[in-house]
Image (tube, grey):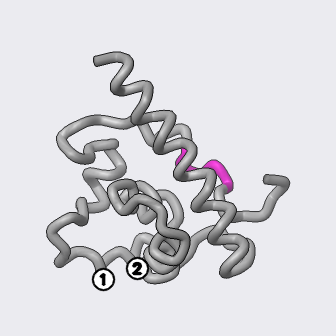
Amino acid sequence: MILKKWRKKRAVSKYVSKVSILLKKDYGPSDSYTGSQIESTVMRYRLERKYLNYALFLFAFENSLSEFSDREDFYVYEDLKKGNLDGSVFDVSGYQGGGFGSGEGD
């Protein structure tokens, strides 16, 4: 159980780092991106869609997430803030306000 959580946390951390770099490459440095920009980047670079909700939570303008609300695989923003995804908990607090996409020395 602990190993499984560690692997998932590691996978999500790598994914977040990769998405951050690719968003900057595609759209320039920004504090936030639209949900469509994030999804396009994930699809363009053939990244795993199973972590798309984390990318949306971490990089999207909160008001741009409404375009995803009618999708079956989209988790509501409040659930993501709590780290609830796929019936498991992942602590995303370390990423909030972490300057991803800001271009500030990262």
Q: Position of residue 7 (x, y in %)?
A: 43, 30
Q: Does the magenta stretch include residue 76?
A: no
Residue at 39% across, 77% down: 63
Q: Where is residue 74 in the image (x, y as percent from the top left)?
A: 24, 65
Q: Position of residue 101 (x, y in %)?
A: 67, 64
Query: Magenta residues: mostly which secondary structure?
Result: loop
Residue at 54% across, 38% down: 94
Q: What stretch is highlighted in magenta?
A: 95-99
Marks 1 and 2 in Cβ contact (< 8 Å) = yes
> Mark 2 packing: few (<14 Cα in 10 Å), some, or many (20+)?
some
Q: Does dot 1 land on a helix, a strand or a loop? A: helix
- What residue is shown with label 2? 64
Q: Which residue lies furthest to the front in this view?
A: 46
**Quarter residue 56 falls in:** bottom left
**Quarter residue 2 falls in:** top left
Amino acid type at mark 1? Glu
Left or right: 35, with 1 as reference point: right
On the question of residue 82 being in view, the answer is: yes
- What residue is shown with label 1? 67
> Mark 1 packing: few (<14 Cα in 10 Å), some, or many (20+)?
few
Amino acid type at mark 2? Ser
On the question of residue 34 being in view, the answer is: no
Residue at 17% across, 78% down: 70
Quadrant in which the N terminus is drawn: top left
Q: Is residue 28 above or below residue 53?
A: below
Q: Does dot 2 land on a helix, a strand or a loop? A: helix
Q: Which residue lies furthest to the right in this view?
A: 105
Residue at 22% across, 46% down: 86
- Count of numbered circles in the view: 2
